[in-house]
Amino acid sequence: MMNTQSLFEQRRQFLFAPSATVRGGLLFCMIAGIFAFVGGMYAGEATRTWGALIFNLFFFFSLALGGVVFSGMQDVISAKWGRPMMRLHESFASFLPVAAVAFLVFFICIGLNLGHAKDVYPWIRDPELVAEFWGKRTWLQPGLMMGRDIFALFSIYGLSLWQLGNKTKPDLLLMSGDQAGASKQGQLSQARLRYWSAPVLIAYALLFTLLAFDITASLAPLWYSTLWGGWSFAVMMQSLMAALLLFMYAVKGTPIGQFMRRQQFHDIGKFMHGFTVFFAYLTYAHIITIWYGNMPEETSFFIARLQGPWLLLLYAVFFLAFILPLFALLPKISKWTSGLAIPICASILLAQWIVNLLIVMPQVTDGSTWTVPWIEVGIFLGILGLFIGSIFRFGRKFPMVSIADPLLHEALADAAHH
């Protein structure tokens, strides 16, 4: 049985540093991203390049935010089951400041019209487009949009910093050798997070919904969707569970993964299965409502994606994000067997990446000329390198197991009795 003293003695083994090979791979990814962005601009495809940056950045930003949202969900009820792998998904939030700065640079480029950034949003390029809609023309103003989104991005970062500060402070005390201080701080942090996690989660929901509407939905300014925030949350959570399960398998054979039993893999697999159904349900609710309404300003969004190369991608999403995981995750064994779970997770992440692509790219590029997605894949690699690099930067400073969390000790004690 692993006890408090054992955790203290092993504390240095829970840090997470990359090997030379991994560092080389991350550097290659970042260079590929730079070449794709510069190459896209040089090839005269500025709006397509900005679009690729937007959807890739929003995809990884959602994963990063999802990491602290899922942590907050467990803290508000003092859940014990997820403590062994909680620090893994919390580490995703280390990408939030990177995403906030990247979006800030993008907004500055819009303000200064660098690289034709103004051409990405049609309502910025042509304000007359929304002139007849009082609500849209009031809300969709470049300065107002950029101001509120910068506020939202850095508010999310600030809240996550407070949340993770409370989670990691006891661990840092324990890493320094102060066992008594770590125990006391762990109890204080647990009580504080149980009290404040609910309002923080509400703030995350409101701020994320604002960003989803402004950054992605407003690319089609005449389109209407009241479900966009909730649907974007479903995309976030299904993607998060797939990414988390992959991460759990990646560290399974290390000291970090020694506390993860079959039950934890099963539980995250069940969450992934549940959010697969939730994503499909909200997608269906979205489409059926627009279909029976049959209003041009709503149906045009989907009609544009039922043509050209986008149609094949829609079929791929239907199979990879819904049909395959829905049935493949029904057997218990598929959730804790790496040969089954890893391909399912990969298919979900690929599908949700395509979903983000389908939201953005048909608005910024002509489907008839969109062939090889070298810009989109290249920028994906660049941001993937930044995302994983952020996790390693976090893991070099903080233990990837919440060693001073009193609920982890309770969870390990409970596991030993069963």
Image: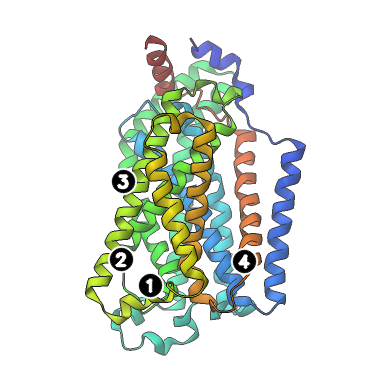
Circle 4: element type: loop
Residue at left offset 55%, top offset 56%: 99
Q: Is residue 402 above or below residue 27?
A: above
* CB-based contact (under 8 Å), mark 4 and mark 1: no
Q: Please give the residue where the numbered disc 3 appears in the rendered image.
A: 199
Identify the amino acid type marked 4: Pro
- Where is residue 164? Give x, y as percent: 48, 38
Q: Please give the residue where the numbered disc 1 appears in the rendered image.
A: 302
Residue 252 lies left or right of residue 185; in this view the side is: right
Q: Please give the residue where the numbered disc 2 appears in the rendered image.
A: 287
- In the image, 403 versus 324, the foreground residue is 324
Q: How is the image coloured?
A: rainbow
Which is more N-terminal, label 4 or label 2? 2
Q: CA distance from mark 3 to mark 2?
A: 32 Å
- Where is residue 258? Give x, y as percent: 54, 21
Q: Please give the residue where the numbered disc 4 appears in the rendered image.
A: 373
Which is more N-terminal, label 2 or label 3? 3
Which is more N-terminal, label 4 or label 3? 3
**Quadrant (top left, top right, bottom left, bottom right) of the C terminus:** top left
Give the total of numbered labels: 4
* CB-based contact (under 8 Å), mark 2 and mark 1: yes
